C-alpha cells in the first residue's frame, strides 16, 4: 500500500511539474504568438566580399554568407580580410526604425555566424568587430538599446555548432583535419562562454536563435539550461538540438524559406529572404515585391506561424535601397491593416479561391488577394451567424450578408480598396464554429491520409521537424486522435497501410485504426532512431456501402509515453474483396 501511495504521489508530482513547465512555456511564448512579424539581419565580414572571392562569384540564389566555406578560404586570409570591416554608415536607430515602420515586432541579428567572427565586443575572443577592426564599437549594444526605446523585442542569432575559424569547431575541414578536432574543447572555450556573454551583457533578450543543430541532446541541453538559468523568459528556437530528434526549443523553425502546406498545432516560424541570399551579395538583385511579402505574411499568419524576414546590410552599414523600398511599402499596408495580423490565430478554413483569413476572437479577417468579378465574396466552412461585415479600411460601411447553399455571401464593392490585399472584417455570434473536417476524395488508387487533412484532438499534434518533416505526434492516450472524413464512391476491399517512425522506447504500444465501424489494431514496431519512417500493412477492410466514413487513428490505452511519429495512412482499392490478413505485429 505504501508503495502504491508513493507511486501515485510520484505520478502526481510529475504531472504537476509538467503543468508548471507548460505554463512557463505559454508565458514565454505569449509575445511571440502576438508579434507575428520580425526582422532577421545577416551581417558580418562576408558583406565586404559581397558575393565574390578572387574572381569566384556566389551563384544567384546561393548564400553569400557561406562564401568562406564555399571557396575554402583559409582562416588566415579570411581573418585578414575581416580587418577591413568598418561600417561607418551603421545607424542602429535607423535600422530599428525601419523594422518598426515595416510593422515588425521583433529583431534578430547574427551575433556570430558560421565564420566565427563576433559582431559584438566579446571578451572570449578578440576576433570580434570591436577588437579586430577599426570600428571599435559594439553594434549589438547599440541595437539592443534602440530596440528597447522603440518597443521592439531584441534577439540574437548564434551559430553554436558551426565555426570555421576555431580549430575544434564544426565545418572547416580544409584548414583543420576533422580527425584532430576536439569539439568539446570548442564548446567549453568559445561557444558556451559567448552565449553567456550575450545573455548577460545586452539586457533582456526576446530570443536566442541557434542554428545548425547539435550532435547530441546532452550538448544541446547545455545551451538550453544556460538560457533557462540566466534568462528564463528568453525564447529558444527549434534549431538548438539535433534535426533528427524531438524539439528542445520553445518553437519550431521551418527550413530556410520554408512554408508548410497547412497549419501546425505548435508555435512555428519561417525564416525567409528578401532576395535569394541572407548575407549581402551585389550580384543578387532579385528582390521580392511588397505585394509578395504581404501575401506571404498573411499566408504564414493564417497557418498560425511567424514570419522572420531577412535583410543583408552592406559592409559599410547601409541597408540596400530595394530592401528599404519594399519594407516601407509593407509598413504602409501594415499601418492600415495590422489589426488583422497582430494577435490573430490560425484559420481552420484553409485557402479560399479569393485568398486567406485570420481569426481574432469573434472576428474573422478575410484577406482578399483576388477580387471577385461579380463583387460577391463566398465564404465556406463557418457555421456561426454573421452579425456584421465591413471593409477594415472603412468600418462604417456595412456590407450586405446572406447565405446560400451553405456559403456565406458578402456583397463587396465593385473594386478592391487595397491593391495587394483588401481586408474584409466579418463579425460572428459566439466562438468560431468551423464546419466538420473537409471531405477527402479518392484518387484512382484509393485514399492517402496525411497530417494536412487530419483533425487532431486531445494531445495529438500536427508537427514539423527538419529531418522528420510534417507528422503527427504527442499522443499518449485513447482521447488523443487523428481523424479524416472520406467520401467513398467505390465499394469493396481496401488494403490499409500505415507509415510512421518509432524509436525503441515507443515499440510495443497498441494502436487502433478505425474505418467507420471497422476496427483493426496493431503494435507499434521500432523503425530506428530519430525519424526513420517505415510502412506497415495492416490488412484489408471491406466497405460494402458508398457514403461518408470517418477514419481514426489513436492509442489503444494510456501509457504515459508517445505512440508514434505518424506520417500517413493509405487505403488502397483491392482488386477483389479479401479477409483481413494482419502482418506480424498486428492483432
Image: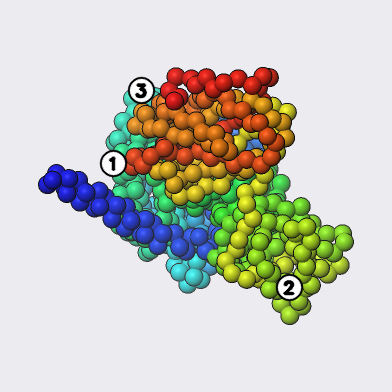
Q: Label 2 near label 1: C-beta < 8 Å?
A: no
The residue closer to the viewer here, 202 or 367, is 367
- Residue placed at 76% from the left, 52% from the top? 353
- Image disc number at residue 463: none
- Mark 1 and mark 2 lie on one chain; the one further toward the N terminus is 1
Rendered-image quadrant of the C terminus:
top left
Q: Separation of disc 3 and disc 1 at Cα? A: 19 Å
> Residue farthest to the bottom?
396
Q: Separation of disc 1 and disc 2 at Cα? A: 59 Å
* SS for dot 1: helix
- Residue placed at 76% from the left, 76% from the top? 398
- Image disc number at residue 390: 2
- The residue tagged 3 is 179
Q: Position of residue 316 (x, y in %)?
A: 57, 55
- Mark 3 and mark 2 lie on one chain; the one further toward the N terminus is 3
Q: Position of residue 527 (x, y in %)?
A: 43, 25
Marks 1, 2: nearer the viewer:
2
Marks 3, 2: nearer the viewer:
2
The residue closer to the viewer here, 121 or 437, is 437
Q: Is residue 134 left or right of residue 497?
A: left
> Residue farthest to the left?
2
* SS for dot 3: helix
* SS for dot 2: strand
Q: Separation of disc 3 and disc 2 at Cα? A: 66 Å
Q: Is residue 271 left or right of residue 397?
A: left
Q: Looking at the rendering, which quadrant does residue 191 occupy?
A: top left
- Image disc number at residue 188: 1
Amino acid at each position: 500500500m505504501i508503495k502504491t501511495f508513493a507511486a501515485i504521489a510520484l505520478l502526481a508530482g510529475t504531472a504537476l511539474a509538467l503543468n508548471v513547465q507548460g505554463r512557463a512555456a505559454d508565458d514565454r511564448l505569449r509575445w511571440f504568438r502576438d508579434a507575428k512579424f520580425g526582422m532577421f539581419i545577416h551581417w558580418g565580414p562576408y558583406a565586404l566580399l559581397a558575393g565574390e572571392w578572387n574572381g569566384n562569384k556566389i551563384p544567384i540564389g546561393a548564400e553569400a554568407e557561406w562564401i568562406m566555406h564555399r571557396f575554402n578560404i583559409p582562416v588566415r586570409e579570411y581573418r585578414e580580410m575581416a580587418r577591413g570591416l568598418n561600417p561607418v554608415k551603421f545607424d542602429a536607430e535607423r535600422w530599428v526604425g525601419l523594422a518598426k515602420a515595416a510593422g515588425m515586432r521583433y529583431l534578430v541579428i547574427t551575433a556570430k555566424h558560421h565564420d566565427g567572427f563576433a559582431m559584438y565586443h566579446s571578451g572570449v575572443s578578440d576576433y570580434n568587430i570591436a577588437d579586430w577592426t577599426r570600428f571599435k564599437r559594439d553594434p549589438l549594444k547599440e541595437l539592443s538599446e534602440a530596440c528597447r526605446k522603440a518597443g521592439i523585442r531584441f534577439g540574437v542569432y548564434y551559430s553554436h555548432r558551426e565555426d570555421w575559424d576555431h580549430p575544434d569547431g564544426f565545418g572547416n575541414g580544409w584548414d583543420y583535419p576533422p580527425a584532430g578536432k576536439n569539439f568539446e574543447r570548442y564548446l567549453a572555450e568559445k561557444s558556451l562562454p559567448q552565449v553567456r556573454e550575450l545573455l548577460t551583457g545586452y539586457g533582456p533578450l526576446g530570443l536566442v536563435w541557434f542554428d545548425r543543430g547539435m550532435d547530441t541532446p546532452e550538448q544541446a541541453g547545455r545551451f538550453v539550461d544556460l538560457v533557462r538559468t540566466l534568462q528564463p523568459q528568453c525564447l529558444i528556437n527549434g534549431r538548438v538540438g539535433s534535426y533528427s530528434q524531438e524539439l528542445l526549443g520553445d518553437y519550431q523553425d521551418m527550413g530556410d524559406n520554408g512554408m508548410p502546406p497547412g497549419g501546425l498545432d505548435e508555435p512555428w516560424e519561417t525564416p525567409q529572404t528578401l532576395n535569394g541570399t541572407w548575407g549581402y551579395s551585389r550580384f543578387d538583385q532579385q528582390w521580392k515585391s511588397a505585394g509578395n511579402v504581404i501575401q506571404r505574411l498573411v499566408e504564414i499568419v493564417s497557418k498560425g506561424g511567424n514570419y522572420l524576414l531577412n535583410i543583408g546590410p552592406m559592409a559599410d552599414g547601409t541597408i540596400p535601397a530595394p530592401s528599404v523600398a519594399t519594407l516601407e511599402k509593407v509598413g504602409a499596408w501594415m499601418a492600415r491593416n495590422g489589426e488583422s495580423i497582430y494577435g490573430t490565430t490560425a484559420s481552420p478554413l484553409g485557402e479560399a479561391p479569393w485568398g486567406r483569413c485570420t481569426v481574432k476572437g469573434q472576428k474573422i479577417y478575410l484577406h482578399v488577394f483576388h477580387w471577385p468579378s461579380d463583387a460577391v465574396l463566398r465564404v465556406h466552412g463557418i457555421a456561426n451567424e454573421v452579425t456584421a461585415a465591413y471593409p477594415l479600411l472603412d468600418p462604417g460601411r456595412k456590407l450586405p450578408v446572406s447565405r446560400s447553399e451553405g456559403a456565406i455571401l458578402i456583397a463587396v464593392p465593385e473594386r478592391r480598396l487595397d491593391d495587394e490585399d483588401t481586408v474584409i472584417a466579418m463579425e460572428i455570434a459566439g466562438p468560431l464554429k468551423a464546419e466538420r473536417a473537409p471531405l477527402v476524395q479518392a484518387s484512382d488508387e484509393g485514399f492517402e491520409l496525411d497530417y494536412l487533412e487530419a483533425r487532431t484532438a486531445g494531445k495529438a499534434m500536427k508537427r514539423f521537424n527538419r529531418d522528420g518533416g510534417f507528422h503527427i505526434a504527442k499522443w499518449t492516450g485513447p482521447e488523443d486522435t487523428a481523424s479524416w472524413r472520406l467520401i467513398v464512391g467505390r465499394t469493396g476491399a481496401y488494403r490499409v497501410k500505415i507509415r510512421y517512425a518509432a524509436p525503441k522506447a515507443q515499440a510495443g504500444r497498441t494502436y487502433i485504426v478505425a474505418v467507420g465501424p471497422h476496427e483493426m489494431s496493431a503494435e507499434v514496431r521500432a523503425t530506428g532512431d530519430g525519424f526513420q519512417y517505415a510502412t506497415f500493412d495492416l490488412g484489408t477492410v471491406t466497405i460494402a456501402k458508398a457514403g461518408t466514413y470517418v477514419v481514426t487513428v489513436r492509442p489503444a490505452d494510456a501509457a504515459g509515453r508517445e505512440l508514434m511519429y505518424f506520417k500517413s495512412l493509405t487505403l488502397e482499392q483491392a482488386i477483389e474483396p479479401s479477409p483481413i490478413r494482419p502482418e506480424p505485429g498486428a492483432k
